[in-house]
């Protein structure tokens, strides 16, 4: 369902379903980008970032990007654009003292709030909140009080995801200087995003190292520290996630899914899938009927 909803506080929500689209834009405010079905690719500078139903992208205010959809089936694209005033008010509510909030209830900031522009996992409370918001809007919800409560909870969930994906992972890195840990994680996230986007390709460690501007051995050591998985293990888990999405949302034969997600051998795919999800791909698909 297609709509653009602009609230009285200037928060905006965009929903559209397209099989083919290419557009270049500059974000007016901090934006969360979701592909609730299919996938959408964003070109941000030299980086290519693809999101699927298991992931989402955050773009800061003023980021120029090109988004592309080129699919055999329609892709559900969903975006939330947070007004800077709403964003500052949310940040103040969770960072300022109670006395300051009481003395200056309308306090807002003048600078934009920026985060690490990377691909984040779309799961748990974040997925639950966004899917319920989308369902309500698709059914004609007009109550701005309720919509803004959903947006408030979306920010709560995003801050939790951000804290886990950035600060917690940075703290796992064995470097004394915090700014060094944040910089290393930023580079590791570039490698992670490259795998998110190119998961079905035969990716080499040298290629990941070039993307992240890290030597191969530095990449191997720090990636395992931050993500508790080696790059190869991370890629296998990602391929299994994408295979599960295809099993759930398409009728592609399993052998075709094996190729689509980057596995070479159906038997190893079935073994790995069963080890992770405790069920074979065939039985998983049958259980959905």
Image: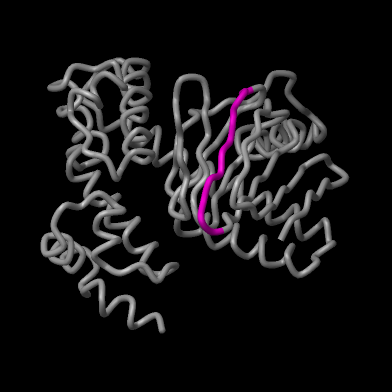
Q: Quadrant of residue 241?
A: bottom left
The mark tally for this picture is 0
Task: Inspect the magenta stretch and tell me whether residue 66 lies in it.
Answer: yes
Instruction: Locate the N terminus by quadrant.
Output: bottom right
Residue depicted at 17% across the width and 39% down the height: 230
Q: Is residue 66 above or below residue 276?
A: above
Q: Is residue 70 left or right of residue 276?
A: right
Quick check: 210 left or right of 166? left
How is the structure coloured here?
Answer: one colour
The x and y percentages for residue 113 are 63, 26
Compared with 164, 270 (above or below) is below
Which residue is depicted at the point 56% across and 38% down? 68
Toward the right, the furthest residue is 8
The picture places residue 12, in percent across and down from the top left corner, at 76, 44
Residue 57 lies, in percent from the top left, at 52, 39
> Which residues are the magenta region?
63-73
Q: Is residue 115 left or right of residue 29?
A: left
Which quarter shows the C terminus?
bottom left
- Secondary structure character of the magenta stretch overall: strand
Which residue does the image show at 19% across and 42% down from the upper left? Answer: 229
Instruction: Check residue 137 for magenta coloring.
Output: no
Viewer-proximal residue among 229 and 177: 229
Write the residue at 43% across / 53% down.
Answer: 54
Say above or below: 139 vs 11. Answer: below
């Amino acid at each position: 369902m297609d709509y653009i909803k602009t609230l009285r506080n200037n928060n905006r929500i965009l929903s559209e379903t397209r099989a083919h689209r290419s557009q270049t834009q500059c974000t007016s405010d901090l934006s969360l980008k979701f592909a609730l079905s299919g996938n959408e690719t964003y070109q941000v500078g030299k980086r290519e970032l693809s999101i699927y139903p298991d992931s989402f992208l955050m773009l800061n205010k003023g980021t120029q990007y090109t988004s592309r959809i080129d699919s055999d089936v329609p892709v559900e694209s969903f975006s939330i654009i947070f007004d800077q005033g709403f964003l500052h008010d949310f940040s103040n509510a969770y960072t300022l003292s109670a006395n300051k909030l009481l003395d200056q209830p309308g306090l807002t900031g003048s600078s934009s709030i920026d985060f690490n522009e990377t691909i984040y996992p779309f799961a748990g409370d974040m997925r639950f909140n966004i899917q319920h918001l989308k369902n309500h809007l698709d059914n004609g919800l007009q109550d701005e009080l309720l919509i803004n409560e959903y947006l408030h909870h979306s920010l709560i969930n995003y801050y939790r995801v951000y804290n886990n994906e950035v600060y917690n992972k940075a703290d796992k890195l064995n470097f004394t200087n915090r700014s060094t840990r944040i910089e290393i994680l930023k580079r590791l996230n570039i490698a992670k995003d490259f795998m998110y986007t190119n998961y079905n390709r035969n990716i080499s460690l040298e290629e990941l190292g070039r993307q992240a501007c890290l030597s191969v051995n530095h990449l191997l050591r720090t990636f395992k520290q931050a993500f508790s998985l080696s790059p190869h293990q991370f890629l296998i888990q990602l391929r299994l996630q994408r295979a599960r999405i295809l099993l759930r949302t398409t009728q592609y034969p399993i052998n075709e899914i094996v190729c689509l997600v980057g596995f070479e051998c159906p038997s190893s795919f079935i073994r790995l899938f069963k080890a992770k999800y405790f069920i074979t791909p065939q039985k998983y698909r049958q259980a959905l009927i």
